Image (tube, grey):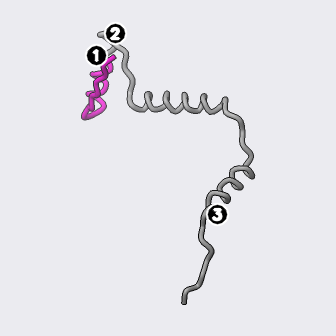
Amino acid sequence: METIIILPKDKAELKFFVELAERLGTKFKTLDEFQDEQLLDRMLENLNTPLVEKENIMDQLHTILNEDQPPYTNED
């Protein structure tokens, strides 16, 4: 499926294109509607992932931050 993007200069022009699409029987979405649908899809996908305790996340972050750091030495 091909997609076109139309950037109307004002609300009246947007209304014109929406009415035109409806009369032609074509499907259309605004960018906001499209982004909302994508966000909802991602949120629904995340409902199926297991919950992780805050402690586990913090422990993992501390481990990552402390990996392979050379010991502090004062060279003054």
Image vertical order of residue 67 relative to residue 11, above or below: below
Image marks 2 and 1: residues in contact by CB distance under 8 Å:
no
Q: Residues within 10 Å of mark 1 (few under 14, many from 20)?
A: few
- State if disc 2 and disc 3 touch (CB < 8 Å): no
> Is 12 in the magenta?
yes
Q: Amino acid at mark 2?
A: Gly
Instruction: Judge by depth and name the residue closer to the eye, 43 or 70.
Output: 70
Q: Which residue is mark 3?
A: 66
Which residue lies under the disc numbered 1? 20
The residue tagged with tag 3: helix, strand or loop?
helix
Q: Nearer the viewer, residue 9 or 32?
A: 32
Above-or-below relation of 44 to 22:
below
Disc on the earlier residue, 2 or 1? 1
Q: Quadrant of the C terminus?
A: bottom right
Q: Which mark is residue 25?
A: 2
Q: Quarter-wise, where is residue 72 in the image?
A: bottom right
Q: Amino acid at mark 1?
A: Leu
Tell me the crowding category of disc 2: few under 14, some 14 to 19, or many 20 or more residues within 10 angstroms, Cα based. few
Q: In the rendering, at what x and y percent does residue 3 appear? A: 31, 22
Q: Answer with mark 3 or mark 2, whichever residue precedes in sequence.
A: 2
